[in-house]
Image (tube, helix red, strand yellow):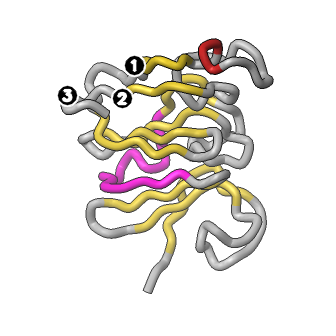
Amino acid sequence: VTSSGDAYVAGENTHGQAGVGPPAVEHDFPLDQIAGASPFLVGLPSNHIAARVSCGEAHTLILTSSGVLFGMGDNSKGQLGVGTVTASYYPAVVASLAPVTLGQTSAGRFHSTATSTDGKLFAWGDNACGQLGLGRVGGVSTTAASVSVG
């Protein structure tokens, strides 16, 4: 993320995690043929300024300065939080968190978390080992779920 709020990515895009469109091929090939060995500007809507980027195994989250969260890439376990398990090749807003102003995010292998500016914790994606902290083990959450702490 640049000081002017532009988000750049480089490298692998086999699942759309670079947010620059669909992958050219779904297998390994030289880096200069993937998303690019040189950085590409991620196309966020013009009224959004990138503040933070979190990278998971094959998905990426971009948090804007206004607290809006975008996800892109692999979504096979709901880790983008967009309500489906369909990959997104371009930044998609995490609508389940739209009424919340976020301060931090983290992207795991197949799950994601975020905290709001008022200290609430949210989690979504794969819960095979209880990693979402929802008090149960198994399943997936395709939208952000509030996590009770303390």
Foreground of the two, 89 or 11:
11
- The amino acid on which the numbered mark 3 sits, given as a three-letter code, is Ser
Q: Which label sits on residue 7? A: 2
Q: Secondary structure at mark 1?
A: strand
116 lies left or right of 5: right
Q: Position of residue 24 (x, y in %)?
A: 70, 13
Residue 98 screen position, x and y as percent? 39, 45
Image quadrant assignment for residue 69: top left
Q: On the rendered structure, is 8 left or right of 48?
A: right
Between the residue at mark 2 and the residue at mark 1, the CA separation in whole angstroms equals 6 Å
57 within the magenta span? no
Which residue has dot 3 on it?
4
Q: Secondary structure at mark 2?
A: loop
Residue drawn at x 58%, y 51% is 143
For disc 1, the marked residue is 41
Do tag 1 and tag 3 residues touch (Cβ < 8 Å)? no
Bounds of the magenta segment: 93-107
